[in-house]
Structure formats: structure tokens, C-alpha cells
Amino acid sequence: MDIEKMVLDSKILIVDDERTHLVLVERALKHGGFSAIKSTLDPREVCDIYKSFLPDLILLDIMMPHMDGFQVMDQLKELDNLKGFRDGTLPILVMTARTDPETCFLSYNAGARDFLEKPISVPVVLSRVRNLLESSYREDAVEALNRDNENLRREIEALKAENLSLKAKLG
Amino acid sequence: MKQINVKKGESIIEEGQPSGSAYIIESGKMEVSKTCANGEKRVMAVLEEKAFIGEMGLIDGLPRSTTVTALENCTVSEFTLEMFNSLAKRNPRALMPFLRILASRLRSTLKIIEDD
């Protein structure tokens, strides 16, 4: 399993009504080797984009016109095919200039996985995105190995039982 | 989260009453007050939109330490103990901002004592 390739092949959606900031984040991700990136200035488009693009991670602004980031998260939770992280959090990294504890707490409560403080720093956004995706893929890999182990254990138990039964028949 | 309308002059939290949920002010202003030993009412803070109220009860479950009264018609969102426990289990990172809120409130209280 090539985790590095999986990380860089991840699909990322950026949602921010500030064009300058959106372009900055997009450039930072491209500079970091990501290529499957979509972005929108309009939070009302997020659900439709999600359905067709199926991003692995969304970088979401909080303070936006028409719909704030909390409302976007509420709408996303209604989708049937929403991919979440193994711990139950949404695949969302909130980007906000409002770093007061209330906003942070409410973002976590809405389901966000983590935070990025605006204005973003390129090394910070890259390391946060990479770490988040990498740990998620590693957790998935561990889970898959655990499932394989459990299946093998069951097969061994079944073979042992079959062996005992054959021995009994042979006397 | 369930939204509750609180009319001007009504109290959403009353000192000495059992703790339950915390609330987040969605709109309006609320006054946090405490009755002193001499029976005098002391205003501790006036809180506005996005402020937490009743957060200590989520941690210790002890009776309410203050009264919170609407200074104008307000709307609050209810944050139950079950929601808090579920969030803490799902995403422990969420506890850090919550601790910052508690620390900030503690500092405000210490400032009041210091100013006396």
C-alpha cells in the first residue's frame, strides 16, 4: 500500500467566499503535490459538488454569505454517501479567522475534524492536510488488516475442528 | 441543537437549581448575576451572541452557581450533557476550546475579586 500516493491522489474541495484566500489555498495544495482539487466561492454549491466529486477532504470557511460553514456541515450530514473519518467526524477542516473558543467548540460540535487559522500559512495547511489524510488511510489499513486477521483466525478454527473430526473418524 | 426563545426578564438558569444543559446565545443579551451573602444581587457579566452559559454544570453537575436573565428577547441553543459526552468521546480535541472558555470565565471571576 503506497500511502504517499494515496494522500496525493486524494480529492480536496475548498470552500471560501474570499477569492484571494481560496486561490492561496489552492496554490498551496498544488505546490504540495495535490492535483485533484475543486473549489467554490459559493457555499450553496457544496452539496451538489460533493455528490459528483466525492472529495476525501473539504477545507471549509465559516463566515460566508448565504450560508455559513455550520449550515454547510448540517446539509452535508444529510447526504447518504458522505464519507466520514473512522472516529465519526466529518471530512472537514475548518478555516476561520474567528479563533474564539466558542467558534472552535461549535465547529467541532458540528462535526469538523480540525481547524486551520486564517490567514493560513502554506507549510501549516500542507502539513495539516497531509497528516489528516495519512492518519486516516493508515487507520483504514489497520482496520482492513484486523478484519483479515479475524477471517484467518476463523479459518484456522474451522480447519482445527475438521482435523479433530477426521481423527475421530479414523479412530 | 434545540432552540429556545427566552423573553426579556425571564431566567434560563437560576442559582441553586439543579444543573442540566448548557446554552449558547444565538441572539440577544443576557445578564449573569449572583446573590451575595448579604442578599444583594451582583452582576457578573453581560453576555452576547455565541457566548456559552451554564457550561460548568456539564463538568461537575453541581447546582447552578449563577442566575442568567434575558436583558432583551433572546434565542438560545440547548447543548445537553449527552451531546457534550458524545462530542468528548468522538473528538477529544473539542475539549480544548471548552477548557479555554472555562479558563476565561475563571480569569474574569478572579478579576472581579481583585477589583474589590
Image: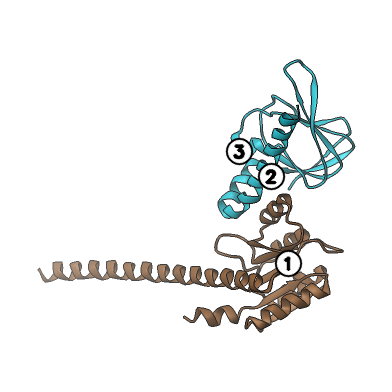
Chain colours: A brown, B cyan
Q: Mark 3 points at which residue?
A: B59
Q: Is residue A36 visible?
A: no
Whole-angstrom CA distance, mark 3 to mark 1, is 30 Å
Whole-angstrom CA distance, mark 2 to mark 3, is 12 Å
Residue B71 percent location from the top left of the image: 88, 34
Secondary structure of the residue carrying numbered label 1: strand
Pointer 1: residues within 10 angstroms few (<14), some, or many (20+)?
many
Marks 1 and 2 on same chain? no
Residue at x 73% of width, y 59% of height: A74
- Single out the mark in the foreground, 1 or 2: 2
Say which of A60 and B1 sits in front: A60
Secondary structure of the residue carrying numbered label 3: helix
Residue at x 74% of width, y 41% of height: B23
Pointer 2: residues within 10 angstroms few (<14), some, or many (20+)?
many
Say which of B112 and A91 sits in front: B112
Chain name for mark 2: B
Residue B22 percent location from the top left of the image: 70, 39
